[in-house]
Image (spheres, coloured by chain):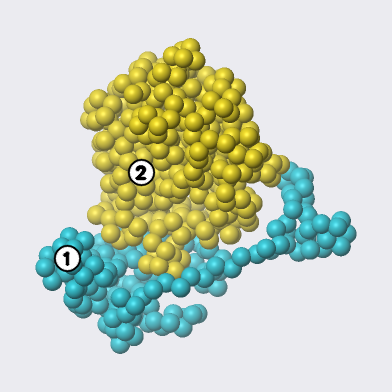
Chain colours: A yellow, B cyan
Amino acid sequence: MAVAIIGAGHSRFGNRRDVNVAELAWESMKQAFDRANVVQKDIDFYIVGMAGLWSSEAAVPSLIAEYAKLYAGSMRIEAACATGSASIGAGYNAIESGEADVVLILGLEKMQESPNPTVIEIIGRYGSYFWEFENFGLTFPAYYALYATAYMNAYNAKEEDFGNVAVKNHYYGSKNPYAQFQKEISLEQALNSPYIAWPFKLYDCSPITDGSACVILASEEKVKEFGLDDTVWIISQGSRTGTANLSKRENFLSFDSARRASQMAYRKAGIDAEKPYLHLDGADVHDCFTSAEIMAYEDLGFAKRGEGVELIREEQTYIGGRIPVNVDGGLKAKGHPVGATGVSQAVEAYKQLLGEAEKGRQVDIKHGRWLTHNIGGTGHYAYVTIYGLEKR
Amino acid sequence: MEYRKAGEKNIKEYGFPVTIDEKLGTLQWVDLRELTLSYLICIENIAPFFENMREGKLVTTRCPECGEIFFPPQKDCPNCMISEMEWIELGREGTLETLTVVFVRPPTFARYDPYVVAIVRLDDGVKITAWLRGDPEKVKIGDRVRIEIKRREKEGHYMYEIVPVEG
């Protein structure tokens, strides 16, 4: 049974201390309801993807039941920064199994309810708590920096290459009205920003973000019943899990979990894993740190091992290049509200494929397929999802 | 926390623990129910690791059936489905695989200066994450390093650390 996205919504990302948790959720839910032309009673099940702890409310599905009058069955899902894609996967399965026809997926995070140092403290714990955090104080940037250092050493990548990822993503963020940072930056600015975890500087890091994103999924029967023709289908999803301790990883040049998740997704979708970019119009990859985007090019097969850095040098991931990547600003400029990120990527896939992205960042859709790459922790959870205009 | 103080002050002036967001100018309720988290983590089944570290030795578990060495040590072998693991002493030398310098530290590490975290592949094959003592600009990936056990400067407990091998 095919599963479609029939509506999508997206709050403005950033400092959202102008709304509370329920109000922030409602912003994207309202847009998704309007777009799908459905109401609460049409929803059979709903999933809230949220990592939490930095924000006050924990029983968010119940908060939503009350605030939005949505009383279908529900659950909350957590898979660190891949929470959003994990939630979409669970919604897909609920429809695929025949248990539900219409499922609402809400990705949500309100990280700025806590001060930044508290968030740094909490997010540093998404590895092996005892063997990495407790005694060695690793932070989220530091985990990724361990990979970045190894990558630079092996493939002669420079801090400047990482800076160019930030320049690209800020360029596209400047064209996205929902992005946290809507201004361009220069390479010089990126390179002159202070070190956070060497080799990462401030502009190599995604920010601490509040935001919500929502998609409504429906079965093929419901799509027919509702008489919808502007839908985007979930073609396939692959997922894998990596070890808690980075010291248990084979090397620090690639996320094995992401590579295998992408192979799974390509196989199910019938996409050639050697040159997948020939079948895709664009991709949203998990650029929580700039080097992670370059590693994603390789893990997804957009470039050969060690050649990801060439793609950014040659501007091959801008619109018009080999494959446009993160033309919504990515996590880097759009922002990274942990639980909402994977859903935000799905919203971007929906908008791009239907030709509804804002001026200056709409990709020319030829193949009708878009990829999202959503990583939780540091390769701890990997989800690769392929969306398309035609069902599989 | 700055806003905590503002909230408490505003109880007197405004009647509620509130503050105004600096950037947006929007009204915030300052939560008064501050939470402190400190876990009890069971190390009963890997106690020899700590007992040996106190004696200056680095040990870990090996499965007597398949021979896999586990670091961090673990009680069970998921390959052979057995729990009778043996303890072995690890060799101290290895090669530096990667490193970073943590400038922006979590508040619970604020009393330390920026620290270097590295991952080393020991000659036994297992990899270990730890702090690296010494100047990060004077070491590079592939350098020979060794593990030393020392008491932590601030907390005072034993911990293993990575040090460059001279020459």
Mark 1 surroundings within 10 Å by alpha-carbon count, few (fewer than 14), some (14 through 19), many (20 or more): few
Where disc 1 sits, the SS reads loop
Q: In this figure, which residue is indicated by the disc labeled 2?
A: A382
Which of the image's four quarters has the N terminus of chain B?
bottom right
In percent of width and height, residue A356 lies at 52, 19
Q: Quadrant of residue A174?
A: top right
Q: Residue at x 12, y 65 (%)?
A: B66
Left/right of residue B4 with respect to residue B96 in the rendered view: right
Residue at image point 59% right, 34% down: A70
**Given the current orientation, which residue lies at the most extreme left position?**
B65
Q: Position of residue A175 (x, y in %)?
A: 57, 27
Q: In the image, is residue B115 above or below residue A194?
A: below
Q: Amino acid at mark 1?
A: Glu
Q: Residues within 10 Å of mark 2 (few under 14, many from 20)?
A: many
Asked which quadrant contains residue B164, the reply is bottom left
Report the amino acid beneath label 2.
Ala
Residue B58 shows up from this direction = yes
